[in-house]
Amino acid sequence: MQFLTRLVDGHVCAYRRDGDDEGPLRPVARWRPCAGDEVVGHAADPSLGRAYYTTLHAVVCVAADGGQVWRSDFAPRSDERYGHRPGCALSADGRALWVYRPDAMAGRGRPDQWTVLDTGTGAALASADLGTVGHSGLQFLHPASGEVLLDVGEGQDGAAVHRASLADGRIDLVRYPWDDRCLLGLAPDGRHFMTVDHAQADIALHTYPDGEVEFTLPVAAFGHDPEAARVEWSGGYLDADTVIVTLVGESDGYGGSDGSGDEGDEGAEEWTRRYLVDTRTGRVRGAFDARTEELYDVRPLGDGSWLTTAPSGHPVRRSAR
């Protein structure tokens, strides 16, 4: 079983993904990082006996009592404090940890690396040179194939999307042939994935694994002026047949051509609108209320529910059902 993880009050907390319970979620396990470690990315072992996390300088495995099981340092140690955030993702069987290393921005004198570690020992099983200069990476596990998708954000230079699997002691790596699309979500059934144009002009759905475009929806498809609105990098798969798309913009006393703003306001007003799109037809179904005011505080779980965040920092499960 894959668990959700969050860093709350200095602890890596794990939460169950399954079940129909709505409202605030309670952690089923929590781990205290080693003294002096500033956690950047994190994952929980399916047994809940261990947690894994990245810092700017290492990947660390800790036991339930908070004791260090192993540590794999990034060498050479970086003197850069900002601009690089290593991340990790656990394989479905819990045996391999995929680690994205933004080595270029960390000042290590080489392009970014994607490394797979043995979760039992921390030993490197395989590594690949990505040829990117990224700040951070977003990883998605395919539900059936065992492959992993990685989006590397390169700031103003765009984004690079990769697909990989571990085979015969090496990473079998494919880079999709674009640098202007940001990966936002993978369908829960693995049939397709969603990207947003780096210039924020549209969203697209692509077939998996080849990446062929199934359909594209520009800002105008949602009833907004493309000169006054843009697609935001927030949203994803509510379920296999539905994606959440987020638009943001500015209006002069009016919330947009959909008539959802407040007339009579003085000055420019920033607004956010979320919509549901049918992944089978590309039809915009209508507006979506995520029940949060925070732009990036929406994490769809693919089963008709999504997470927001309580004031405590723990996740809150919401449902469209």
Image: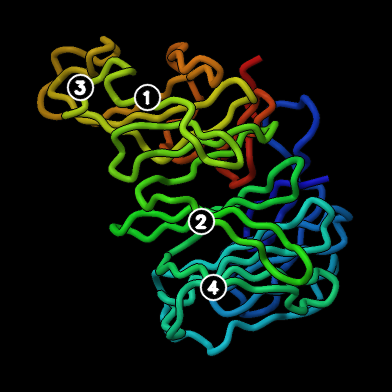
Residue 269 visible in the snapshot: no
Mark nearer the N terminus (1 vs 4): 4
Q: Nearer the viewer, mark 3 or mark 4?
A: 4
Local secondary structure at mark 1? strand
Mark nearer the N terminus (3 vs 2): 2
Which sits in the foreground, 21 or 218? 218
Residue pointed to by mark 3 = 225
At label 1, which amino acid type do we have?
A: Leu
Mark nearer the N terminus (3 vs 4): 4
Local secondary structure at mark 2? strand
Local secondary structure at mark 3? loop
Query: Which image quadrant for residue 31?
Result: bottom right
Coloring applied to the structure: rainbow
In the figure, 191 relative to 118: above or below? above
At label 3, which amino acid type do we have?
A: Asp
Label 3 to label 2, Cα distance in Å?
Answer: 33 Å
Local secondary structure at mark 4? strand
Residue 49 coordinates in the image, percent (x, y) = 87, 61
Residue pointed to by mark 2 = 175
Residue 47 coordinates in the image, percent (x, y) = 89, 55
Query: Which image quadrant for residue 316?
Result: top right
Label 2 to label 4, Cα distance in Å?
Answer: 11 Å
